[in-house]
Each structure stands twice: as C-alpha cells, then as structure tokens.
Image (cartoon, rainbow, N blue to C red):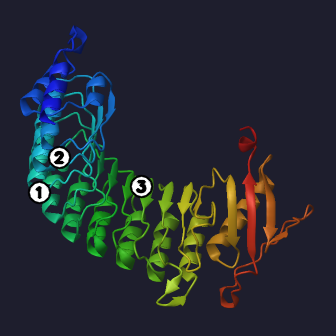
Amino acid sequence: SDLDSEAEIAELMQLDISEDAANTGKQEYLQKCSELGIVPVAMFIAKLECEHINLRHHGMGVKGAQSLAAALKVNTKIRSLNLGDNWFGDYGVMAVSEVLKVNTTLTSINLADNRVALVGVKTLCKGLQENNTLAELSLKGNGLDDRAALPISEALAGSTSLTRVDLSYNHFGEEAGRLFGEMLAAHNYLLDVNLKWNSLRAKGGAQVAEALKTNTVLNKVDLGWNGLGDGGAKAISDMLATNAALTHLDMSHNRINLQGALDLAEGIKVNAALMTLELGFNPMGMQGFKLNPDGISAIVDALKANENLESVGLSNVQSRGSRTRGRASRFDPKNPDGHYVLDLNEPWDNFLAETLYERMINEVGESWINHTLNGTALELPKDEAWQIPKPDPGNYNPKSNVLELDYVTWKRGLE
C-alpha cells in the first residue's frame, strides 16, 4: 500500500550517508524516490559502490528510471549497468539520456526490452552525442523500425567512444540497412555490431556488406535471422573477398539456398581474416524442393582452402540435418573434444570425419573412443590409413554410412 511505501522510504532515509558514499548518489536516489513516492530498489542501494550492477527485470518504470538518473548523475563508481526489461518507455529513457550528458565513468549500459519508441530514441541519441566515455550500448528488443535508424546512425557516426552496439531483435528494414551501411563505411571505432533478428532482407544486407568493404576496424558482425537470401549471400561473398578486418560473422537463419552457398564459397575461399563463421539453419543442400549437395560441397571445399577459420557452424544446412548431431552442429577444429554423429553420405559430415581422422592420427595423445559405423564397433586399421566412405548423394541410404564417435584430446584427459 501507499502507507507501506512511505514507511519503507522513511526508514531508508534514516540510513547514515558516509563520506565515502558521497559520490555514489545514494542520497540523491533516496530523495528522488521520496519525491516520486516509490519504494527504492534495495539491490541498487546495496551496490552503488560496485563497478557492475545488474538490475534487469525489476519493473522500475518511468519513476524508477528518473530516480536512478538522479543517482547516476553524481555516481563515479559504476562502470557497467544492465537496465534491461524495466518498462522505462520513452520518458524513462529520456531520464537516462540526461545521465549520459554528465556522467563520465559509465562505459556500458543495457537498455534492452524497455518499450522505447522513436521519441525516446531521439532523446537518447542527443545524449550520446554529448558523451565521450560510453563504450557499449544495447537497444535490443525495443521494436525499433526504420524511423529510428536515422538518429541512431547519426549518433553512432559521431561517437568516438562506442565500440559495441546491440540493435538485435528489432524491426529494422531495408532503409535501416542503407543508413547503417553509410555509417559503417566510414566508422573507425566500432568493433562489434549485432543486427540479428531484424528485416534487412537482401537489399539492406547488401548495403551493410558494401560498407564493410571499406571498413578496416569492425571485426564482429551478427546478421542472423534477417532474410538475406541468395542475393544477400552474394553481397556478403563479394565483401569477404576484400575485407581484411572481420573475424566473426554470423549469417545463420537467412534462407540461403544452393546459389547463395555457391557464391559464399567463393568469398570464404579467398578471405584471410575470418576466424568464426556461422551458417547454420540455411537450406543450402536444397534446390527448390529437391536435394542438391553442390552448395554444401562448395562450402566444404572453400573451408579446406581457407587456413584461418577456427570455428564453423553448419547445423541443419542439410535437409536431413538434426539438432541432436552432437559436435557436428558446430565444429571447432582447435577444440574438437566431444560426441559426433556423422552421416558420411553428406559432404559436410564427410569433411568432418576426414578432418577428425587426420588430426587423430597426427596428434599425440588424441584418439577416437566408442566409435561405431552403422551401430557396429569400428576397428580402425593400425598399419594403414582408414578409407573413409565417400559421399554418394545419388544413392542415399540413411543407415548405410553413419559414423558415431567421441573425440578425446590429452587436455580433456587432465580434467
């Protein structure tokens, strides 16, 4: 009840405010809570002298944001603050934007899932333009669309401190892709951009890809779940042929089919920077409604030619793929330990078997255990190399060449 709230506030106001806490904003926070008639968040009070605070899911609302802002304007302790899912809305974020204009110690702020609309974003971006210390910003899951892309891109273009931005799970479309592309083309500070789960489509994705041709700083981009299709894949491939900065790229869940896979393979083959690539959940093994392994085979050949990739995700790129295939879903050549279920009639699985076998026989202390072929214990030859059955997509039998094994390295044996 209101009486209970007033009693709690009165009790908290009696707390001693030590000299050491003078720069934490505790007094300002309690006074603002009292003024607005809300109950202070005990966790926030307890951690005002900590560098990292997680206040996600506290349902603070607009008044809670305004009270926090009163403390943050004078606080010199907090470096990282997670305010996700607090129903701040536009007016709550407006209060946060005022903090950015004066706070010089906050380097990371998470405003995900706060029902922020265009008005709030515009005000926030004005605050960003006056801030030169914030390095990480998340606006994930706020339902932002192309209208918000312009103020965001302008704020990012003018920032020399931001290095990581999360704009995933919004409604950005083709126009946003164009605006973000123009911003990224000349940006010299951003290192990590997350645009996952938007609606960039082929045109928007192509604009971002074109920008990355000239960007020499950005090293991590997530474009998953954007409906890029084969057209977007072609643009990404052309970018990979020239980009020398990007080390981590996620293109999963993008409706990339046979032609897209063939195009991507050309870019992967010549790229010398990528270390992690995610292509999972794209129907690259299909041509229309028919099976066609040519795209996956081209990707496999490109991976063989590329000497830099350390981790590759190709989960469910085959029509017969499964989420229960163990480490075959995401393969890390430098850390191969784990359980594998490989269909040797599929190009990707056959490639994994070949890679794992070559490593096992060449690395001391590494081995296959519990290995079976079609459910029967597999005896590997000791005096000669094992001849791995080659893919035969034209004569597919789902039970004819299934290899199952556990890969164990000497490092795992020490655990």
Decide: few, some or many residues near mark 3? Use Cα within 10 Å; few <14, some 14-19, many ≥20: many
- Name the residue carrying label 3: 244
Tell us which disc is closer to us: 2 or 1.
2
Q: Closest to the observer: 393 or 64?
A: 64
Q: Quadrant of the N terminus?
A: top left
Q: Closest to the observer: 326 or 160?
A: 326
Q: Are marks 2 and 1 in contact (CB under 8 Å)?
A: no
Tell us which disc is closer to us: 3 or 2.
2
Please provide percent x and percent y for residue 78: 27, 27
Q: Closest to the observer: 297 or 326?
A: 326
**Would you say 95 lies left or right of 105 here?**
left
- Which residue: 46% across, 68% down? 267
- Is any atom of residue 276 visible in this view? yes
Please provide percent x and percent y for residue 247: 45, 53
Q: Which mark is residue 118?
A: 1
Please provide percent x and percent y for residue 364: 80, 47
* Among the two numbered marks 3 and 2 on one chain, the one whose residue lies closer to the N terminus: 2
Tell us which disc is closer to us: 1 or 3.
1
- Name the residue carrying label 2: 88
- The amino acid at mark 3 is Ala
Decide: few, some or many residues near mark 1? Use Cα within 10 Å; few <14, some 14-19, many ≥20: some
Question: Disc 1 and disc 3: Cα gap in Å?
Answer: 35 Å
Question: Disc 3 and disc 2: Cα gap in Å?
Answer: 40 Å
